[in-house]
Image: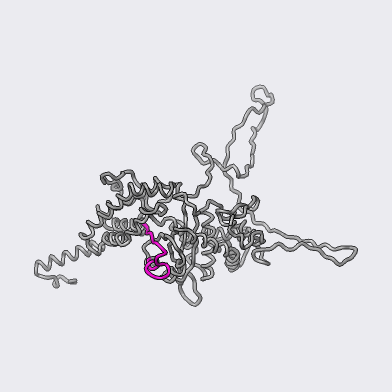
Amino acid sequence: MPAQADDLPEDMEQMAALVRELQAENAQLRALLKGMAHQAFGSRSERASAILGDQGILDLGDLVTTPAAAANDDGDAEDKPAVARPRRKRGVMALPAHIERVERVIDPDTLDCPCCAGTLHRIGEDASEALDWVPAIVRVIRTVRPRYACRKCREGVVQAPAPRRAIPGSMVTTSTLAWMATARFAWSIPLNRQLQMLAGQGVILDRALPSRWMRKIAWWVKALYDRLLAYIHSQSRIFCDETRMPVLEKGRRRTRTTQFWAHACDDGPWSGPAHPAVVYIHARGRRHAEAFEQLARYQGVIQVDGYGAYKALVRSGPGRGKITLAFCLAHARRKFVDAYRKSPSPVAAAIIALISQVYVVEARVRKGTAAQRLQARLAETADVMAKIKAQIDTMLPRLSPKSDLAKAMRYTLNHWKGLTLFLEDGRIEVDTNTVERGMRNVAQGRKSSLFAGSEEGAQTWAVMASLLQTARLGGLDPYTWLNDVLERIVTGAVKINELDILLPWNWRPAAEPVKALAA
């Protein structure tokens, strides 16, 4: 590229070619700068209105023009566990009936009649309720085991056995351990912040203690974690994804980037048998070897993004012929969204609007049976997907191969069979948002803690986050569930061959009768 005016060509054709080259380079740099600025300062929403503005509703002939939700929009009630909601009162959610009521009666200053000085009588009342918060109470459980002896023979000494503890000889109860684990792995409150909260109550603990405690309780529930993973792999259709996990390593000045792989299942959208569940598996990388190690024995449909490690499962090795890959339409959509944000194009806008119509149909048939969903997809969605492919086939040869829009189109065509597999099976979702929602728990914890202290700590993280997140997906309070499960495992009330009754969808509080599962 000429650096000075003297280096400019004198020939007009060469000058015109140089100008065109500079214009193309400037357009590419402007698009890159716009994308980076949006990534840093722009809206994170993927709703069509946030991306396209007034162009979110396009005149597309026979297509429905109702504004569609974003591809990864999970704010609808249908996507959440079916939890009994309290009644509404005056437009506000009424307070749950099971919460303790403390009644405070406010009488007038005097019960003498202001007119005749007679005694006033109660003829009615006005009552209102307000939610009150009582801070957590830290207390010490002092366990006393008296020793008894016989005064006559003076030989036999009787004493009750000491209750089993999750950590023998420790200063904390199972309830404290459950609270710390829930705060850390379900609500993303780092352990050092919990120590500061306890210090405010006058309890000063060594910083290394909580980490050792978390490893110990992860050891107690590791068998339940294995049962949860086995349950997910027993389903005919699962979701998989992965996300980075920085880990401190002794002898290194910086963290090593390892991976959390997530395996999930949920048949709730079509009222199927599989309960919502997610398991995180810690691995040193995200290569083909890790994917083979985790999924080589699986047989069925795996819904994933376009990462090559999953494709290797069906190209060669034990998974060939046993695993079918279904790809994520939301990932394809995001590529068109990114292309549109960098360089607004009516073609990208049209494809985004067409994909939105797919989600309009999906929202309407959610909670229907697999057969009902398939029928609606064949009747409506198949035509929409055909129009998307026709648009891509028509426009791709006219675009520069290096443009973001062309890359989005090539990605979509290369994964077309897996992207349209939901048109052949009503059980399959259109995207992998089921497992991506499960990844949010890991991302929030990673943001709070920055990294895991060691590979053993990352494994503890995977075990505890898997169980607590699955409890949350099932609509349970994670602390109540974990406290009860830990207590019953530690005391031996539940044996190793009875762990299935502690899985979140089978669990009942210890006060309720627990029915043994059928074989």
Coloring applied to the structure = one colour
Highlighted magenta segment, given as a residue range: 311-328
Residue 272 screen position, x and y as percent: 47, 51
Query: Residue 87 versus residue 270: which sits nearer the camera?
Result: 270
In the rendered image, the vertical position of residue 141 relative to residue 361, given as above or below? below
Judge from the rendering whether residue 168 lies leftward or rightward of residue 421; answer left or right.
Answer: right
Residue lying farthest top?
116
Q: Position of residue 212 (x, y in %)?
A: 59, 68
Residue that lies at the very extreme toward the bottom in this rendered image: 251
Residue 90 can be seen in this image: yes
Outermost residue toward the left in this view:
11
Query: Residue sitting at 57 percent across and 65 percent down?
Result: 222
Task: For residue 344, say whether it is visible.
Answer: no
- In the picture, measured across the screen, residue 194 lies left or right of residue 162, that is left
Q: 7 or 70, which is in the foreground?
A: 70
Q: Residue 213 or 493: which is nearer the viewer?
A: 493
Q: Where is residue 420 drawn, in percent x and y? A: 34, 56
Q: Position of residue 110 (x, y in %)?
A: 66, 31
Residue 368 as seen in the image, left or right of residue 220: left
